[in-house]
Image: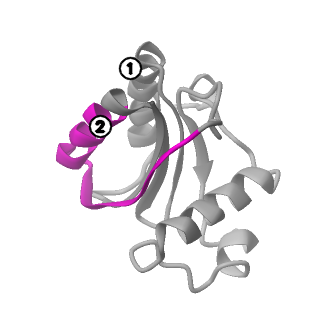
Amino acid sequence: MRVRLLYVSRAVGPQTTTVTASILAAAQKRNAADGIGGVLCQGQGMYLQVLEGERPAINRLYARIVTDPRHEDVQMLLFDEIAQPRCAGWSMALVNLSDRDPMVRLGHPEFDPYQASGADAMKLVDELLDSGRPIVLPADYAT
């Protein structure tokens, strides 16, 4: 059974290129081996991440994320069975959320993932993916 999990967390420490590169490199290797796809939206001190794959693999990965010292205030926003993956072909892609980005600042200035429903948070991720924003794959991300 394939599932989609969406969670939000706060970054412990700055979201530097080095930290992001290490997250993406580890995710690319492990997720590809486990048949997991996903996208990480990061910025403004938060992570908003979609994970897709077989339920046991997603559950194991989420358990690791909850205990990862780079995250705090981890909250699951959505967990659904899916027929079609949204993140097919990406072991982990990245969307940077800058506070100077009009999509973030003007399109959703009130958005708080900790207060949003899972459906609303997933809608925002879908909008980000459909907006033509640069999707960075781990191999493209410079350290």
Q: Nearer the viewer, residue 107 or 14?
A: 107
Left or right of 122 in this view: 4 = left
Of residues 91 and 76, which is closer to you in this image? 76
Q: Few, some or many C-alpha atoms within 10 Å of disc 2 (few <14, some 14-19, many ≥20)? A: some
Between 16 and 120, the one lying in front of the other is 120
Q: Contact (CB < 8 A) between labels 1 and 2?
A: no
- Report helix, strand or loop for mark 1: helix
Q: Looking at the picture, how far across and down is residue 17, in whole percent?
A: 48, 42
**Residue 2 placement (x, y as % from top left):** 48, 32
> What's under tag 2, amino acid-wise?
Asn
Q: Quadrant of residue 134?
A: top right
The three-letter amino acid code for the residue at tag 1 is Arg
Alpha carbon distance from label 1 to label 2: 14 Å
**Could you say where residue 92 lies in the image, as x and y percent from the top left?**
53, 32
> Image point 42% across, 13% down: which residue?
33
- Relative placement, left or right, of 87 versus 61 is right
Please give left or right for residue 74 compared with residue 132 in the image: left
**Res 62 → quadrant:** top left
Q: Is residue 85 above or below residue 140?
A: below
Q: Residue at x 65, y 24 (%)?
A: 89
The reply to whether the magenta stretch includes residue 63 is yes
Quadrant for the N terminus, please.
Answer: top left
Mark before the other along the chain sequence, 1 or 2: 1
In the image, what residue occupies the spot 78% across and 53% down?
130
What residue did someone put label 2 on?
Answer: 59
Q: How far across and down, in percent of the image, does residue 106 sit?
A: 72, 81
Element marked by disc 2: helix
Label at residue 121: none
Magenta stretch, residue numbers: 58-82
Query: Which residue: 38% across, 20% down?
Result: 30
Q: Which residue is mark 1?
A: 30
- Residue 66 vertical position relative to residue 107 in the rendered view, above or below: above
